[in-house]
Image (cartoon, rainbow, N blue to C red):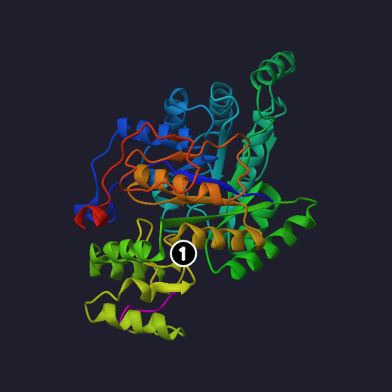
Amino acid sequence: MAVKLLWYLTEPDGPVPWENDGRWTTGFDHLQQLATSIDKLGYYGALLATGGGFGNDVNTVAAALAAQTKRMRFVAALYPGLIAPAKLAQIARTIDRFTEGRLIYNVVNGSDAMLPSMGFHITHDERYDFSFEYWDAFRKLYSGSPDGYEGEYIKIAPYPPALAGMVKRQQSSAIQYQPNIPLWGAGTSAPGVAHSAKLLDVYLSFADKPHLLGEKFKRVGAEAAKHGRKLTFGTRLQIIVRETEEEAWEYAQYLVDRTSVQYAKDSILRQLPPGETFEGYRSPDPQVQKNLESIRAGKLPKARDYEIYPNIWTGPALHGFNVLGPLAGTTLVGSAENVAARIREFEANGTHAFILSGWPLIEEAHRVADLLFPLLDLDHGFEVPQLSSVRRSRYPLRGERHAQAAEESITPDPVTQAA
């Protein structure tokens, strides 16, 4: 089974966007450039993150960028309940029609810390019951059902009999490309897995060692099978891919050198088990414990000290510095050949969709497409162009696989520029 490679379409950006001095001020023009690059390079699509409730609205971004793109799919992350299911169904039908079937929703169930600030005061387990009803109602409404919805949390009255037929015809005629919007999402707790097994089309998880991620996917797949359903699986990874291993790890070290000890401490505090403290926690992993002691002493370990598996790294990233173990910031680091080997190992363990990001986003999107795409069997639903970077003197061509040069200019790589 071939793999799908997606990119990241959101703000912020920059060479080291988790630090103030490495983050760019960007706007809609930058998002347009980024979307155009993702589309022309041939990625399957891109994740539009929620921004934690205070970032850009993903439906607005997807609609605004539809005209600049032709093939890429918009994986729009949404919290259930912020938009009424009936209104979301209308929005989704509109975007899907205008993008010719390129909309996907990423189901985000939130956290105990985040949901109250959005007006949702429900318990951990309840939020999955609420989410299931929300998306179940959305799907029925999207497909044109006039019957309403009667759940514990979601209650929608049916259309009056005199209007039901007309409404169903109008709504059904608006569905031109997808009979329903695919739902991607995650959930690791027992209620989260049960929710995913009943609802999702693609189950996502933060990355781990390939065999450990595969074991997790098998458990979730077994739960889905109990409902007569079959899921496909995906993961979220940062990526540093270069011509050689040495270049990749040189860049990883550059990122460590640009990262503050405070960012590492803040990330560790978010990752600590309940009841543990920064000073008191001890890791069962000797290397993690050694890294932790160095950070407590005010010094970041070297880049290679965060490698937990060949080419899998828990160094600094926008989504966290996962010193204690792999989470949202986990990164693939290495030569194109070795990174491709790791992706194939993930694939052998059940992973078929990879949502990737590297910084700066446009430059690294080019680099990944240039170096990695030709080494993998891609399942994007269209012929993927084999693009090379405009700056050919800096990124040497690899054999005959470059059919054309990318039209967009890209930002200088701070490591090679300094060299």
Instruction: Answer above or below: position of 275 versus 318.
Output: below
The reply to whether residue 76 is in sight is no
Residue in the image at 38% along x and 72% along y: 323
Q: Tell me if mark 1 has few (under 14), some (14-19) or many (20+) residues whose alpha carbon lies within 10 angstroms of its own.
A: many
Q: Position of residue 119 (x, y in %)?
A: 43, 46
**Which residue is at the front of the view, 327 or 45?**
45
Q: Quadrant of residue 249?
A: bottom left
Hey, what amino acid is under mark 1? Leu
The residue lying at 73 percent from left, 55 percent from top is 224
Mark yes or no: residue 300 visible.
Answer: yes
Whether 70 is drawn above or below 312: the answer is above
Residue found at the far front of this picture: 399
Q: Residue at x 49, y 36 (%)?
A: 403
Q: Nearer the viewer, residue 57 or 386?
A: 386
The answer to whether residue 278 is magenta is yes
Residue marked by disc 1: 327
Is 343 displayed left or right of 332 in the figure?
right
Where, quadrant-wise, is the C terminus in this rendering? Answer: bottom left
- 286 vs 394, left or right, is right
